[in-house]
Amino acid sequence: MLISLGKPLRRPDGSVSCFHIASGPPRNPARPLLNDAIWKFFADHYGHPIRVLDDHDDADGELDGYAWIGEDDMDSTSFEDYLRGWEGLRVGTELTVEQLEAPPTRIAPAVDAAEQQDVAVHVAFPPRMLNRWSVEFETGKLRVVSARGMRNSDGLLRLIDDHLLLSEYHGFGQVRAERVVLRDFGRLWASNRPSAVEILRVLPCSLAHARDEQRSLHYALMDLNPSIVDAVLAELRSAPAEGMTTPIAVFDHRSSQAPAGDARFDWHPRRWPEDPAVAEALKKWLGGGGEDLFYALVADLSGSDFTGGQLDHAWFLYSDLSGAVLRDASLREAECTEARFVQCDLTDTDATGANFDQADFTRARLAWADLTAASADDAKFRDASLAGALLTNTSLVRADLTNADLRDCRFDMTRLTGASLHTARVSGATGSVIGPAIVRDDDRTALLDGPDLADWFRRRGARVRAVSAEAPAAAPENLISPALRRKRKQNSVVKIRMMIDWNMDPFWIRERCDSVSYPVSAADLREYCDIPDDLVAGIDRWHAEWVALLDWGCPPDTEFPSPEAEADWSRRGREFAERVAALLPRHIRFEHSGEVLCSGLPGLEDAVSERFRLAHGFG
């Protein structure tokens, strides 16, 4: 008798790593009929020698005449028929083959009716739903924990409910909460796949146990990359289903999250800005008119409610959002330099790659916010709450974090160079930071780095590794992508002029941090736009023609060989300028020989000049 284990998958050295039936999920350990058939096979052949072979091991045909179990042909006995009537299925529980064949889960898109289920699993759970649960369920009924760094399901179960000492088969169904949110499940999947799979395999039966006891219990898996959601659903779909008569509902929340490019048209503020001009500009933008991006320059948005708003790449430069609500909003790569977020609610906001340099977050709430690759240099976070925030590659150089709540923060090469951590609460924080940072230690102010800074975190209940700013891994270019660095460089530019001045490079750039322009070559424009190589070469030749003719004694007296040559040179310069203008971001003002080819963002140059004047005491 032969039982089919599937195809042997081999390592490079030829040894077998595992067996797998078919080409896709589920894995063999997640096939209940196969596993029960193997145990019956062992029982049937107790005391007999058993060999494990593949098709190539039967070159001589010695296995001809053997009966097959589980093969895909008419002469083979199916697993179902092989198990039918086997008393082993009734040991410890009463199971039928039909129950073994029943699927453990029923996967469906997320709908409002999901909350009507007694028990359920939610995959790719969105932050807005967590906010809703936070309002609907009192303390004790809702449990939010991070799965990041968990070594096994036992540790995670104890984190969810410390009265459960062991993760028994139905352990996850015995928790006292009604709603359990597992954050960072994607991190667990990436770093410890066996533990993640173990949790997924026990969830359906655990929830069935809770349902049998007539208890309400939902599990939600958060922070999953789209690329792994299908794999997570496959594991839930193939989990053991022993004793289950009704599948557990699994809701896929990807369908409830609109694409970032379309979401703004389906969203409206809960409370509009009081400034009529700002409100009108926002309504026009939401209606699909005007600019591709939302620009709010020196705008009053205080008290507005932008909950759930899709504001990626938006500009809030120098704007006031004090007291505003941006819970569960998306501010990815937003430009918020010197913006005021005093007492603003940014809970669960996605601010990946945003620029908050010199912004004011005094007493703001940023709990569970995602600030990955964001820059908040010289920003104020006094008395702000960043509990549970994700600070991967976040730059907080010289930031004021006095009395800030950093408990359970997830640092990961977070730049704290020169940041002030006086009386900051850091218990439960994990990861790595780049020093040195200014701390209050033993009634004295100290600048700590390396092991000393790590020890300061440890004595306050955090597990944080400190990396010296001199380490190669701490270099800024290793912490954020080239595309994001260029985006910030672009956003800092106010005006570019293409002009001839002696033999200087032909492009003159003014940034927000300076009151004067500086010259750069055509090749240097690659920091600000995708200028093609042929355009760079053409401009270089055009500029070299001028330099070759330059009258160093009196540049205005420089003469071309003929009026026609001068006209041709001027024409080509204008054509080059028009091509460059078409490549630049919308906010940059671009001039060619005094002529405005792109007007830029209205009011930007005046606002920057005023800020520079006030910052340097010129008025």
Image (spheres, helix red, strand yellow):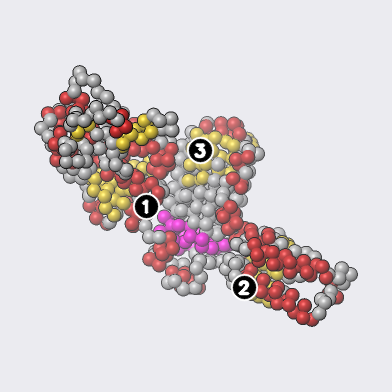
Whether tag 3 and tag 1 are in contact, CB under 8 A, the answer is no
506 or 12: nearer the viewer: 12
- Viewer can see residue 443: no
Q: Which mark is residue 431?
A: 3
Which residue is identified by label 2?
A: 598
Residues shaded magenta: 302-331
Quarter of the image that includes the N terminus: top left
Whether tag 1 and tag 2 are in contact, CB under 8 A, the answer is no
Residue 89's spot in the image, x, y percent? 15, 31
Looking at the image, residue 549 lies above or below residue 346: below
The answer to whether residue 87 is left or right of residue 283 is: left
Say which amino acid is labelled 3: Gly
Q: CA distance from mark 2 to mark 3?
A: 45 Å
Query: In which quadrant of the rendered view does residue 204 lie?
Result: top left
Q: CA distance from mark 3 to mark 1?
A: 24 Å
Which residue is identified by label 1?
A: 126
Say which amino acid is labelled 2: Cys
Looking at the image, residue 446 lies above or below residue 112: above
Say which amino acid is labelled 1: Pro
Residue drawn at (67%, 64%), measured in percent from left and top? 536
Mark 3 secondary-structure assignment: strand
Q: For the view shown, which residue lies furthest in the left direction?
A: 85
Residue 341's spot in the image, x, y percent? 52, 56
Mark 2 secondary-structure assignment: strand
Q: In the rendered structure, does residue 100 fall within the stretch colored magenta?
A: no
Residue drawn at (58%, 58%), measured in percent from left and top? 487
Magenta: predominant secondary structure element?
loop
Q: For the view shown, which residue lies furthest in the top direction?
A: 47
Residue 21's spot in the image, x, y percent? 28, 39
Q: CA distance from mark 1 to mark 2?
A: 40 Å
